[in-house]
Image (cartoon, helix red, strand yellow):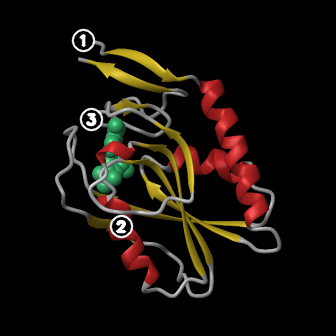
Amino acid sequence: MEDKIRVLLTEEEVNEKIKKIGEQVSKDYAGKSVHMICVLKGGVFFTCELAKRITVPVSLDFMSVSSYGSETKSSGIVKIIKDLDEPLEGKDVLIVEDIIDSGRTLSYLIEILKKRNPASIRLCTLLDKPERRVTDVKVDYVGFNIPDEFVVGYGLDYAQKYRNLPFIGVVEQ
Ligand code: 5GP
């Protein structure tokens, strides 16, 4: 049976926001390059769209960590499934996430990436659920603060489905 999906953020709203973040990132990194780290799989759509909107030189790398299975709640366990291909030494790193929920995934990532001596590390997320935070993470670029609902689309899945939706929706149970 098909799930019913309610639109939370339209394709136009998301695209407009990504354009604005791209402009801000381009200003903030003027005269430098951005080394974007896409957190797979959810961050991939946002990373690609954002990269296209950045006007300073961009390099890309990919990392996969797991903190959720196909369930809708955090397991609290974060493990590296795929590590980066390139060293971070001296690079201005921008971590790109789809969503920050408890903050566990990002605080873990930041700790391990800091040890690789980048020149700087900033965080960018398309979506944030601030009321769900259990660990303190400083986020530099946030697309939208959203309520505590399980969302899909734009890279976000429900049991591996709906990543390809061009908008952000809520699966109605
Ligand atoms: P955190 O470690 O901040 O609790 O969780 C971050 C990860 O949890 C995200 O990268 C994402 O994979 C998953 N996640 C958190 N909230 C949602 C949600 O509403 N929808 C989906 N599809 N994934 C979520």
Provide the residue designation for mark 2: 107
User: Mark 2 or mark 3, which has the lower sequence index?
Assistant: 2
Can residue 82 be seen here? The reply is no
Label 2 crowd (10 A; few <14 / some 14-19 / many >=20) = some
Q: Amino acid at mark 2?
A: Ser
Asked which quadrant contains residue 78, the reply is bottom left
Reply above or below: 37 against 17: below
145 or 81, which lies in front?
145
Asked which quadrant contains residue 158, the reply is top left
130 or 123, which lies in front?
130
Instruction: Find residue 142 and report its horizontal and vertical position in percent.
Output: 55, 48
Provide the residue designation for mark 3: 159
Instruction: Find residue 147 and report its horizontal and vertical position in percent.
Output: 38, 32
Instruction: Find residue 23 and report its horizontal and vertical position in percent.
Output: 76, 51
Label 1 crowd (10 A; few <14 / some 14-19 / many >=20) = few
Q: Nearer the viewer, mark 2 or mark 3?
A: 2
Provide the residue designation for mark 1: 1
